Image (cartoon, grey):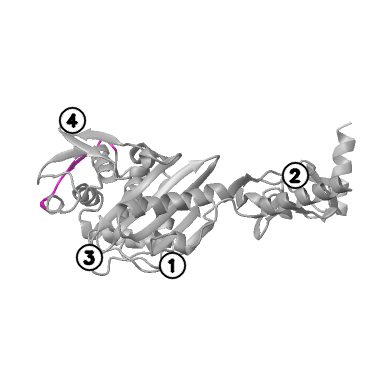
Amino acid sequence: MRKVIVSILLACSLLITAAAPAFALDEGSISAPSAILMEARTGKILFEKNAHENRPCASITKVMTLLLVFEAMDSGRLSLDDTITSSAHAASMGGSDIWLEEGESMTADDMIKATVVASANDAAVALAEHISGSEDAFVEQMNARAKEMGMDDTTFKNCNGLDEEGHLTSAYDVALMSRELMKHEKIYDYTSIWLDYLRNGETQIVNTNKLLKTYKGITGLKTGTTDDAGCCMAASAQRDGMTLLSVVLGCDTGKQRFADSAALLDYGFANYAVKELKAPEDLPDTLSVNGGMESSVGISCDIQGSIVTEKASADEAQCEVDLPEAADAPVEEGEVVGKITYTFGDEKQTYEILAENAVEPTSFGRIFAYLFNSITAL
């Protein structure tokens, strides 16, 4: 009897342990006045603290600049081999820079490298002017793109993040544009650089993201510091098939910025997992058809997705198939004949089951034509 009681107590303790978070986090644990943690592929928010509070974000502004740069490359308007010449305006930028001189030329590749690794304000402006003709025109495009992405908390006044009245965003909006930039995997070729050189080895640049040296799985993304913004960071990391994105704005010191970013990422990796979705093995290949020229129709469900769930409930997934015993003719090719719903806690994803071909309804004329063709074929 005692062994039974001990076993029951042990089982209960295991259940309690499984249900408890592996790594707890609350707003007080994060020193930054504004922060967010997001799973990058799905956009699911795992933690937030004053995420929609309007704040300056310093050089994290360059995330949007880089997004437009990579989109310009996608459209063929920019090539990494293009020569970019610095204007007087670009060369006049203060703060972090690579000391461009008016008329100095570099490849787009080196300008991007300088913008990402050294957070060079002058290089960012040179890229903007090359793409749009002027920084003002480029900033208009930044704001238009922000609006497209639903960045309702954001107004850009420049392309590099230098303090300027009205240049504001939020941790949530930074996460949105960072997630979009991360879809361009080429960005990691730059964000993963720790140390490199420009001007044929004459200018050394060192990455401002110190987590590259200390955090397992770190892949980027961008730091920023100004008097108005404080110390800010958008950090991305990948482990076990899951990519996380954290944003902290307004930290008092660089040390706090990196500590907060690491704490957010640790929390996400410790408590959440990505579950890949697959069609049920017993999903039939066909569906019966009532009143059709054919007795059945081929069906399929294209499931290419994943869902983020707490590790403690990762095995509690439910899959519900809503499929009738038969469809009524006519059936159109691509017609929705059912659906599959996956449920993980409060998360749901639904996929449509589609008809692979058309099935016409039966009629005297169609039946007669079918019989005639069958007889004449003999």
Quadrant of the rendering where the C terminus is positioned: top right
Q: Please name which of the two marks, 2 or 4, marks the residue nearer to the observer.
A: 4
Q: Please provide the residue range marked out in magenta.
A: 80-88
Classify 187 as above or below 328.
above
Classify 35 as above or below 1.
below
Residue shown at 27% from the left, 35% from the top = 195
As helix, strand or loop, the secondary structure at mark 4 comes to loop
How packed is label 4: few (under 14 Cα within 10 Å), some, or many (20 or more)? Answer: few
The tag earlier along the polypeptide, 2 or 1, is 1
Q: Please name which of the two marks, 2 or 1, marks the residue nearer to the observer.
A: 1
As helix, strand or loop, the secondary structure at mark 2 comes to loop
Percent of width and height locating residue 346? 65, 60
Identify which amino acid the numbered label 4 is placed on: Gly
- Residue placed under numbered mark 3 in the picture: 164
Q: Are marks 2 and 3 in contact (CB under 8 Å)?
A: no
Instruction: Indicate left or right for 312 with 321 as reference.
Output: left
Q: Please name which of the two marks, 2 or 3, marks the residue nearer to the observer.
A: 3
